[in-house]
Image: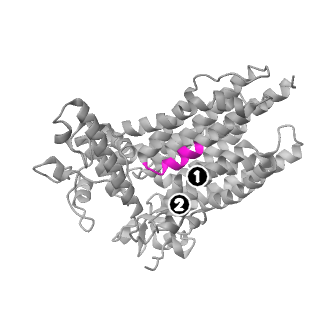
Amino acid sequence: MKNWGVSRQRLVPPMQEGPLWGWLGPILVAVFGGILRFFRLGEPHAVVFDETFYIKDAYALLQYGAERAMLGTAEDPVADKRLITGNLDIFKQCADAHECALYVAHPPLGKWMIAVGEWLFGMTPFGWRFAAALVGTLSILILARVARRMTRSTLLGCFAGLLLALDGLHFVLSRTALLDIFLMFWVLAAFACLVVDRDRAREKLADWYESGPGPSLGLRPWRVAAGICLGAACAVKWSGIFFLIAFAVMSLMWDMGARRVIGLRRPYRASLALDVPGWPVALAVVPAVTYLLSWTTWFVTDNGWGRNWEQATSSGPLFFVVDSVRSWLQYQLQVLGFHTDLTQYHPYMSEPWTWPLLFRPVSFHYPTGIPPSACGSDACSQAVLGVGTPALWYGSALALLGLVAWYVSSRDWRAGAVLLTYAAGWLPWFYYALAQNRTMYLFYMIPLVPFMVLAVTLVAGLALGRADAAPARRAAGAAAVGAFALIVLINFGWLYPVLSAETITQAEWWSRMLVDSWVKTAPK
């Protein structure tokens, strides 16, 4: 018989604070982040960067259940111009619905989320950005709560939420109707569900302390919830598959580790017998079904690209199902080919190994012809630059290096989880850059920003030290952590005008371009 008190303490460490502040603190931080994101959400009053694709696709989903061809071209965006004036006559008119079906490269869920804001608030900049701002705000709350659960400290949880609220890239994408903020949200939500599932599984094991093969953990709703979130991530962008694979492996390893900590004689054999059978259901079948369900309106209408409706409906319900699935699978293969051949040059494209250094952000919006009276100077600027807060990003790079050393020395699960997630979201892009020369952008890093923040938070916990450490030690750690948070706040505040389309002088804009590569066009 083992020392059960020590094992239970390792399995389920207690929280340092009660549930009241455990919720109130993160909610207050999320409200602060939400105010930042919703304030002037309708500015700029323009179609910004790739909003030109997703806001119109979302509106087409509302109207037709599938994406539809629009008026205009890239050189003459007639539909964009009409939307800004409130004219919703933006669709091409076709005698046959199939002639107007639009080929799109991304699954529909992210566009459906954008469509919710358009349905609630209309086809206005506020309407089509509402969902992004909402999930951006909710992600702050989720991160604060998951950081609290991982560190057992409400203070560190709020610290994590505050840093995410002050990241420039997260801020910009929370105010822009692109898909990547929704991918980030579902990946973070899945991770949070798995962390809760880890605690719940360990609590069940802690309630059972006899040696032997160990108990079955039964129904695991949090793991199923994680599977739904991961399926939703893939239904926003296919890159969600990287996180699905990583999280599935990570969750199984957590189960094996828990059975080893509890002192079972054959922990890995017990995990294979009792945990593995339900594992693929939650983290393979459930995500697949979720992904398939996101295409519901493509299946039930005849407006979607590649939808062979007449043939599918001509020979009875069984043939309808078979032919519909066949057409859908063919569509998925077409999308795979599109991504493989995506090599078109863009002046703000960048390579993945430069992303952590913020070498080339993306200019989302920079209009010309702003009258001098708007800023009281000869030249005015109104910019939206998709860039992270440098103090946070460079601090997180050092923190990630620190986590490598920490994990090698202690095998701490928290360091391992953050490092695995970061690797899963970053390293696959190296292959696409080297093997396919894919067109890629800095904002592909947005799913990793919460985990960069978690890396900083875990290192901050080490800096603060244990609760029973010497007062001087705790004070020094608190001063260092507080100083870092203040530096991030000042850095974000300095960049805020070029993140939020404030009208400033061009000299003020230039002063915020920290390196030439932020604005200089790359050579072809």
Residue found at x 80% / y 29%: 265
Q: Secondary structure at mark 2?
A: helix
Q: Nearer the viewer, residue 496 or 157?
A: 157
Asked if the residue under mark 1 is in contact with the one under mark 2, i.e. CB atoms within 8 Å, the reply is no
* Chosen colour scheme: one colour
Residue 509 in the image, given as x and y percentages of width and height:
49, 69
Q: Measure how far apart labels 2 and 1 are at the Cα level.
A: 9 Å
Describe residue 523's horizontal placement relative to residue 273 as left or right: left
Percent of width and height locating residue 444:
50, 57
Residue at horizontal 57 percent and vertical 73 percent from the top: 515
Q: Secondary structure at mark 1?
A: helix
Pinpoint residue 498: horizontal percent, then vertical percent: 48, 63
Q: Amino acid at mark 1?
A: Ala
Indicate which disc residue 69 carries: none
Q: Look at the image and give the residue range highlighted in magenta.
A: 237-247
Q: What residue did someone put label 2 on? A: 429
* Residue positioned 73% across, 54% down in the render: 404
Who is closer to the viewer here, 487 or 389? Answer: 389
Return the residue at label 1: 424
